[in-house]
Amino acid sequence: MIMRTMNAAIFNEVCNHPEVRPWLGGEGLIDTAPVLDNPGNYGLFGEGGGFILVAGPAASYEVHSQFVPEGRKHSFEAMRAGMDYMFTRTNALQLTTFLPDNNPAARGLALKGGFKEWFRRENTPLGPGTQARIDIDDWICRTPDLEADGERFHHAIEDAKAKFGSKLPNHPEDKLHDRYAGAALLMCERGQMMKAEALYNRWAVNAGYTPIKRISDAPPLMDVGEGVLVTLGSDGLEVLQCP
């Protein structure tokens, strides 16, 4: 479980823990308030620590992670939850992070979570290391949990075709299609209709699928292909028309 917070005090307690502070560079007490007071940044806190994500250009966010020793056993699941949050609830298209050479645990966690080495940095406050990144398409392609949401979407369309007596064919089984459809569905349900449309269509035109078309944000209405109209907001998925 992870939640967004702007409460700097809980992050400060973790950052200034004697077994965490030495890994964060610099001297003296750390105060995260100047970063978290900016609503364009995100603080995602879970059991024993969390992540501060600083907004950068082109919908990118730089990730800073901190967990007390007893919370590190939860750090991988927290990272997965954090990626889900950022990629489906915000405008984020890319996450970046710095992996110091002298912190192999942080490097191992990031690579296990799907971050890819990007380029070297030699002179930083944390010493030499590697800048790493994960893009939203990388996240979708390596997240099988999204298939369940894609199947939920496709089953609703198939049920509607039967209900309306539609002659439209059903899609063949395609796990990657399920992942992209599932990601787009979650974005729509979480208030990111425009992002869902752009992300799905960029993939669909390359994969040979029909693009979707956003009709309106309020109420949330999408043409998901061939005139099939669905509402995709917080109240769930409902098929309104199926020719």
Image (cartoon, rainbow, N blue to C red):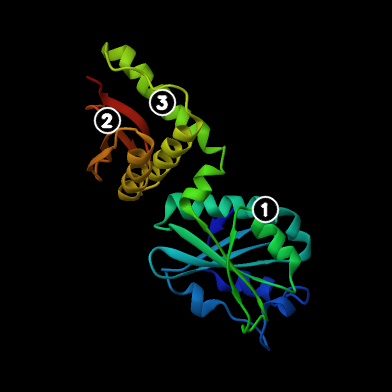
Q: Residue at x 24, y 27 (%)?
A: 226
Residue 33 is situated, as x and y percent measured from the top left of the image, at 53, 77
The residues tagged by marks 2 and 3 sit, at their Cα atoms, a distance apart of 12 Å
Residue 195 is situated, as x and y percent measured from the top left of the image, at 34, 50
Q: Secondary structure at mark 2?
A: loop
What label sits on residue 112 in the rendered view?
A: 1
User: Residue flagged by tag 2: what amino acid is it?
Assistant: Gly
Q: Residue at x 25, y 39 (%)?
A: 213
User: Residue flagged by tag 3: what amino acid is it?
Assistant: His
Mark 2, mark 3: which one is toward the viewer? 2
Relative horizontal placement of residue 116, taking residue 176 as reference (left or right): right
The residues tagged by marks 2 and 1 sit, at their Cα atoms, a distance apart of 36 Å
Which comes before the other along the chain, label 2 or label 1?
1
**Image quadrant where residue 223 sits:** top left
Callout 3 environment at 10 Å: few (<14), some (14 to 19), or many (20+)?
Answer: some
**Image quadrant where residue 10 sits:** bottom right
Residue 1 is situated, as x and y percent measured from the top left of the image, at 61, 50
As rendered, which of 60 and 129 lies closer to the eye? Answer: 129
Q: Is residue 79 above or below residue 148?
A: below
Q: Is residue 91 above or below residue 121?
A: above
Residue 173 is situated, as x and y percent measured from the top left of the image, at 47, 23
What label sits on residue 154 in the rendered view?
A: 3
Residue receiving disc 2: 225
Callout 1 environment at 10 Å: few (<14), some (14 to 19), or many (20+)?
Answer: few
Q: Secondary structure at mark 1?
A: helix
Confirm or deny contact between disc 2 and disc 1 (CB under 8 A): no
Which comes before the other along the chain, label 1 or label 3?
1
